[in-house]
Amino acid sequence: MSNASTPPHPSPTAVAARVSSIMDPRRAPVVQIDAALPAVAPRLLRAEGLRQAFVAHPYGGEPEIFRERSWTDRPPAKAAVLVALVQRQEMHVLLTQRSAGLSNHSGQIAFPGGRQDPEDRDVNDTALREAWEEVGLARERVEIIGRLPEYATGSGFEVTPIVGLVQPPFDLQANPGEVDEVFEVPLSFLMNPAHHRWQQLDTPEISRRWLSMPYDDPESGHQRFIWGATASMLRNLYRFLAFPPAS
């Protein structure tokens, strides 16, 4: 009898490490663009239209995307992000470029947010606290109007997106340990599915498909590559506004 044994099936963490070492999400093939879907009506992208939508459905309806393939063996942790909608002449979404030194989602574009602390009263409190700690957005500048469905990231977080209207003016200060940049993207751009691209990477270990919304930022002069969890949560906001749940 041979003493040879079958190699153990690789853990999600091991597979993720191998895939991430060869994956540049910008370069993965685009397999679908959702240009045939309608853009959200402009009236729904103004403060009153957004308030009314969340008054009718405070929890954001049914999600289109709610879970990523897990690449960690640890138990899930609760987290919250702030989908901060800035009330300029045209509504904008406040986003961050995460620090390259972070252990999770380093260098990626994200909403301000993070893990829920025991001292937080609820997920609203988590989102507001994290926005203050990461970018210096004072909670009194934020009018919370609702939330989107919980989203499970591959890194082991169960994230509740809290939606809030932000009234300028405000001064932001990025926490250099967590955030490299803070910037804004017009909500109308993100709520137009002509800018929603599905990309796919196939390797011997895994087939992975994700959503991206690349934005050519006129302020910085370079492209903001919004993808993964952030793009998925924005897609759920799109679904909620474009195809509202039945009353």
Image: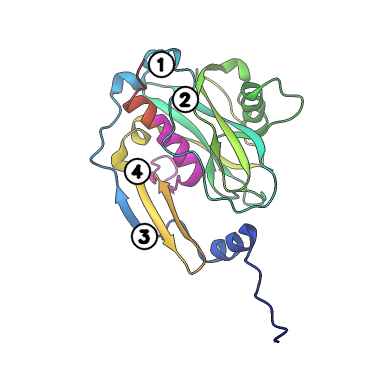
Q: In this figure, which residue is indicated by the disc labeled 1?
A: 47
Q: CA distance from mark 4 to mark 3?
A: 14 Å
The residue closer to the viewer here, 100 or 72, is: 72
Q: Is residue 210 left or right of residue 101?
A: left
Q: Is residue 127 above or below residue 200?
A: above
Q: CA distance from mark 1 to mark 4?
A: 23 Å
The residue closer to the viewer here, 128 or 159, is: 159
User: Is any part of residue 222 visible from this angle?
Assistant: no
Q: CA distance from mark 3 to mark 2?
A: 31 Å
Residue drawn at x 66%, y 69% as measured from the top left: 8
Disc 3 is placed on an element classified as loop
Residue drawn at x 42%, y 30% as measured from the top left: 237
Label pair 4/2, CB-CB below 8 angstroms: no
Q: Label 1 crowding class (10 Å Cα cut-off): few <14, some 14-19, many 20+?
A: some
Q: Label 3 crowding class (10 Å Cα cut-off): few <14, some 14-19, many 20+?
A: some
Label pair 1/4, CB-CB below 8 angstroms: no
Q: In this figure, which residue is indicated by the disc labeled 4?
A: 196
Query: Counting residues from the N terminus, which is met first, the one under dot 4 or under dot 2?
Result: 2
Q: Nearer the viewer, mark 1 or mark 3?
A: 3
The residue closer to the viewer here, 190 or 78, is: 78
Check disc 3 and give the amino acid type. Answer: Pro
- Span highlighted in magenta in the image: 214-237
Q: In this figure, which residue is indicated by the disc labeled 2?
A: 85
Check disc 1 and give the amino acid type. Answer: Ala
Residue 98 location (% of width, % of height) = 59, 44
Q: Is residue 52 above or below residue 76?
A: above
Q: In this figure, which residue is indicated by the disc labeled 3?
A: 29
